[in-house]
């Protein structure tokens, strides 16, 4: 579902919905200025907390795919967290930043991947004051909000952030791929193009996500 407001456009997609990655990719294509500005993906969080691992799990999945041409910051091996976020935020002033992080929300929203055309405010759920980051934000609702937010994140089952990260990484990969192959599709020669990148990107893209 896409809700259009006066200041931002927001998309909410449950990770388990059939075709979620394709629909998320469509929204990303609409809002990320591919080919117009440098782009980076900043995946925020830490593997020290299972609920907060959504960001670095997404970054790791994107890195392992090896097909993303844009910088990816934040992985399980090299997380982006409270100690280095300020430096990373300041270093990307001229770069369009897609910020990815876990969040807490309403119980009925658990499992949703939320896209907003505004910055993230990392650490807000656990009472931390960190610099905002991102021109576009992707948030994964990993659990329900509660007064003891830190404890909730630490006791969140890893399975949910892991599955959500797989769908998010697939959506980002699809968005990048669809942008790169768009000129081929518009020329009407996509069926004759033997480029290996095209072969990887097109099979079964409209089928339910396999995660």
Image (cartoon, rainbow, N blue to C red):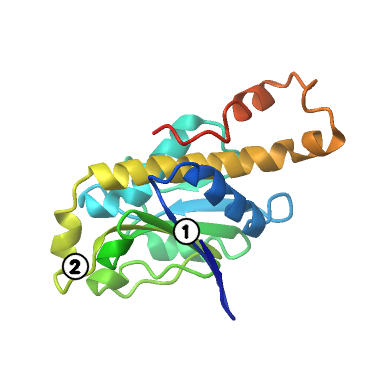
Which badge, 1 or 2, is on the more N-terminal residue?
Answer: 1
Most foreground residue, 204 or 132? 204
Residue 114 pos. (x, y %) = 44, 60
- Image side of residue 99 versus residue 135, left or right: left
- Quarter of the figure that contains the C terminus: top left
On residue 99, the disc is: 1
The span from disc 1 to disc 2 (Cα, nearest Å) is: 21 Å
**In the image, residue 82 above or below residue 208:** below
Q: Quadrant of residue 16?
A: top left
Residue name at image x 49 percent, y 39 percent: 170
Residue 32 is at least partly visible in this image = yes
Residue 109 pos. (x, y %) = 33, 62
Q: Nearer the viewer, mark 1 or mark 2?
A: 2
On residue 149, the disc is: 2
**In the image, residue 92 above or below residue 179:** below
Most foreground residue, 55 or 9? 9
Residue 75 is at least partly visible in this image = no
- Mark 2 secondary-structure assignment: helix
- Mark 1 secondary-structure assignment: strand
How many residues crowd mark 2 within 10 Å: few (<14), some (14–19), many (20+)? Answer: some
- Image side of residue 11 versus residue 106, left or right: right
Residue name at image x 56 percent, y 65 percent: 135
């Amino acid at each position: 579902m896409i809700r259009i407001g006066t200041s931002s456009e927001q998309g909410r997609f449950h990770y388990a919905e059939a075709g979620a990655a394709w629909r998320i990719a469509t929204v990303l294509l609409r809002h990320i200025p591919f080919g117009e500005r440098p782009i980076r993906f900043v995946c925020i969080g830490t593997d020290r907390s299972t609920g907060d691992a959504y960001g670095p799990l997404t970054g790791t999945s994107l890195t392992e795919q090896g097909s993303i041409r844009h910088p990816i910051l934040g992985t399980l091996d090299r997380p982006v967290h409270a100690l280095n976020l300020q430096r990373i935020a300041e270093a990307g002033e001229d770069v369009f930043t897609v910020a990815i992080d876990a969040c807490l929300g309403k119980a009925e929203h658990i499992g949703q991947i939320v896209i907003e055309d505004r910055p993230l405010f990392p650490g807000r759920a656990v009472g931390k004051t960190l610099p905002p980051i991102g021109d576009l934000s992707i948030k994964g609702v990993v659990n329900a909000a509660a007064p003891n937010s830190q404890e909730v994140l630490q006791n969140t089952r890893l399975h949910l952030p892991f599955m959500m990260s797989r769908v998010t990484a697939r959506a980002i990969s699809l968005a990048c791929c669809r942008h790169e192959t768009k000129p081929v599709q518009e020329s009407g020669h996509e069926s004759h193009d033997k480029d290996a990148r095209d072969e990887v990107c097109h099979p079964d893209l409209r089928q339910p996500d396999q995660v």
